Image (cartoon, helix red, strand yellow):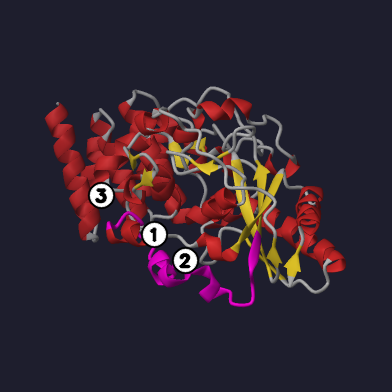
Amino acid sequence: MILSAADARRLTNAALSAGFERAGLAPLAALADAGLRAWLADGRHAGMKYLERFLPLREDPRRAFPKYRSVLVVAADYGDDRSAPPPPDRGDVARYARGDDYHLVLKARLRALQGALRAEFPAVVTRPFVDSGPLNEKLAAAVAGLGWVGRNTNLVNRRAGSWCVLGLLLLSADVVAAASPAKDYCGLCTRCLEVCPTGAIVAPYELDARLCISYLTIEHAGPIPRALRPAVGNRIFGCDDCQAVCPWNRFATRSPSEPFRPRDDLHGRPLTEWLSLDAASFATTFAGAAILRAGAEGFARNVLVAAGNAFAAGAGDADLDRAVERRLADPSPVVRDAAAWALGRRRDGRATRALKERREVETNEAVRLEIDASLAEKSERR
């Protein structure tokens, strides 16, 4: 079945009516992820092993979805926040995660769109995806004309910038594309490469997830590599630096739709308060929010790394000191490791005593090594 150019316009208009800001169409055959194999071979996917399993399907998506022919790509803007970043003893949350979880929001909108298309195109079978399945959403969006993949590896649109999230709706019909792939307008700009705290953008259009703060604070399991912790700063979930400096974001909307409006006190909240959350209160506090993806253990690890950086910056208070010390007895060795590192950044004898006392009862070898390293560094600083 082939849908005409007029049908394509009806499809994209239906997507706009479902609440998306932009929509475009691309043939499934054009979404072959040609650069993925080399990126995986270099190990730049870090712990995202599922990308290895999906390699053959991402190189030829038609193998994964043989009954589908095209994809409708949709974009939703979550808005730009140009307020001053929070001080070191308060947590910095990536802009997209300050409202409702976009996975849930976009999936609901796509299901509503499915219903509308079912009535208008009853012969067309559809299947929605939001950050799932063996498809490269940014590549699909670029092929569909919604923008270009910039040097920071994010999708950029000349009129809307890059503060957006993407969804896909597979179609069982061939469609006359409504737009041509967008031109790359990064020009000679290298601001995103220069601002990246850890140098994760290793070259224009090339990201090494092993160094990326967004990966480390969201997807990564286990301790954050010690050498990278100072660069994490107070970022407790994600990182926006490479988008914040992008010149095209001066056109970005500052008024996102209701689901993406920041929740009260989610961003810039004192680290001490976040460290008071146990697993149950973590789940309750972040119900329906993207931060749940980090898990209670990962989130506590992130907050403790931020606390260590706050101590190094001369920030924090007695309440934060005590909150970190309590985490030395946490059931998770990952959390105890981060707490020991954080205390090692404090410049007082109380921290030294707390670390030595924990060293006497600690049973995990990796945590003991962290305590030893932190004590050694404190001794050198004296």
Secondary element type, mark 2 = helix
Tags 2 and 1 touching, CB below 8 Å: yes
Residues in magenta? 42-71
Q: Is residue 332 above or below residue 55?
A: above
What crowding class fits label 1: few (fewer than 14 Cα within 10 Å), some (14-19), or many (20 or more)? some
Tags 3 and 1 touching, CB below 8 Å: no
- Earlier sequence position, callout 3 versus callout 1: 1
Q: Which residue is mark 1?
A: 36
Work out which residue is located at the far right of the displayed protein and give it: 119
- Residue 258 in view: yes
Position in image of residue 149 (x %, y %): 49, 44
Q: Residue at x 17, y 36 (%)?
A: 377
- Residue 331 in view: no
Q: Which residue is mark 3?
A: 358
Secondary element type, mark 1 = helix
Q: Which residue is mark 2?
A: 58
At label 2, the amino acid type is Arg
